[in-house]
Image (cartoon, rainbow, N blue to C red):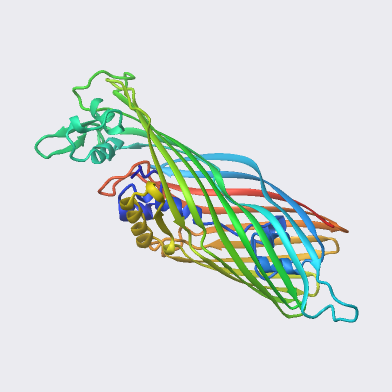
Amino acid sequence: MKRILTLVLVAIVAITGTSYAQYASDALRFSQTNYGSNARFKGLGNAQIGVGGDMSSLGGNPAGLGLFTRSEFSLTPEFNQTRLNTTYLNQNMNTTKSQLNVNQLGVVYYGPTYRRKGQDTKKGVVSMVVGLGYNRNNDYGSENNFSGINSTSSIADYFAETAGSASPNNLTQGTPERIAYDNYLISFDDVANNYYPETFADNTTSNTQSKNEVRSGAVSEFNFAAAANISNQVYIGASIGLLNIRYNSDAQYIETGRAREYLNDNLTGNNINYKLLFNQNQITKGSGLNGRIGVIFRAAEGLRFGATIQTPSWFVIDDFYSESLDNRGTIRGTSDSKTYDFTYNLRTPMKASLGGSYIIGGQALLSADVDFIDYASTKFSTNGNNGDNATINDNNTSVRQNFTSAVNYRLGLEYKIEAVSLRGGYAVNGTPYKTDETGLFDSKAYSGGIGYRTGKYAIDLAYQRLENTTTGSPYTLNNGNEPIANMVSAKNNVFLTFGIRF
């Protein structure tokens, strides 16, 4: 069950040095979600907790539904382009991947409460609002390429370490370690009772390493929400979210170089006698449940404060991982594709949010939010008969040792000129890593937008740029001397919302 750690953050690798950290990195991936919203609030940096009266309340603060005065339907398609700039062994490569998705879909039904003739219609429960919505909260689509010349290590070092002290006859046929041994990439030392690499990686002989990884998938959320307007001053709401995880990763690592001199049959006539292709595939599927409760308080004319608590999300996750090794060297060999299936339960952290908004002069809206989330509270547990207690415990230890609490904040500004609204926003998601004291792994978002509303129709356009930095390695070594890839990601998103009131 302890599958290979590939391109995970070095903050985990450096401390754990073991492959079980892969599940911990997946848990973080599925925990770092943002509140769902339409193009209006994308343009406002998603600062929505203290605003309300918008379809975004379905995926954010459900109390905001209480500010609706009419029913409404909206649809938000999106176009996103992810650009990765990767530096590996002093070489730089850029990769771009684009896609089109539905980001948000929702409908809200407004219902004024029944009052007898003569009763005050502005006191007590003024209205009830219910809504159904869909949000694509996280998008994992990306492609990453890197390449470099390594004179320090080879993936054969990794295979030598993972083979352990098992005798060659006890290495399972078809595994990458056995193929590496049969192809003279690693050898067994009978005296030391361990394996050592047969590939050269020194000042005079280097190997060329490259990797391509394509990722796809998303975390989607279906929400049912309800809210009440109390005396046009206090708005309360609650929602239930049904979540769906889909994550795929296809990776191929290629290494060419020279093994020991007694293998003198050159593959290319260029002092290269081996070329290995290490293929890895991960398919992760999951479903889960969470809930939100929220409140918005109208403190004064134009001034509102809001608060939301999002419960942990409880997931059941099925993970399918496979790997194979193809060596095209002096002695050719191909491993069978080995598949490792693992089903586990995952509880992501609770999130608490505060927000406020202020309308200036009837034309400008200023909004600000802050989130508090403790990634160290992420927890794995076994699922029925598929439990692997050792792996579960190892991952929970990894979470406690490496993750910490984080603070996210968002700022937004909207200015209206008659029927046209201009918007801008900025957001930061704080680093989840204990060792990241400088905020290297903070995620930043810059956004802007424009909207137009006439009568019952509205159209909004927003642009959002997400930036973050990660580091990783194609393989890990016990001494921590694996090569490091530094990756800077820039995701450019365009959102277009169509809305109609009825």
Q: Residue at x 28, y 19 (%)?
A: 266
- In the rendering, at what x and y percent does residue 481 appear? 29, 47
Q: Nearer the viewer, residue 132 or 447?
A: 132
Q: Position of residue 177 (x, y in %)?
A: 27, 33
Is residue 120 rendered to the left or right of residue 379? right
Q: How many marks?
A: 0
Using the rendered view, name the quadrant where residue 4 is placed. top left
Instruction: Residue 466: tell me if it is visible.
Output: yes
- In the rendered image, which quarter is residue 477 located in? top left
Please, which residue is most extreme toward the left here?
191
Q: Nearer the viewer, residue 473 or 340?
A: 340
Q: Is residue 452 left or right of residue 4?
A: right
Q: Quadrant of the N terminus?
A: top left
Q: Is residue 382 left or right of residue 259?
A: right
Looking at the image, residue 463 lies above or below residue 124: above
Query: Closest to the observer: 342 or 336?
Result: 342
On screen, residue 86 above or below 110: above
Q: Residue furthest right?
A: 117
x and y, in percent, of residue 210 in the image: 40, 35
Side (left or right) of 317 relative to 136 = left
Q: Is residue 272 visible?
A: no
> Residue 238's quadrant in the figure?
bottom right
Kindly identify the residue that appears in the image at 59 percent across and 54 percent down.
242
- Taking the spot 33% from the left edge, 47% from the top edge, the residue there is 19
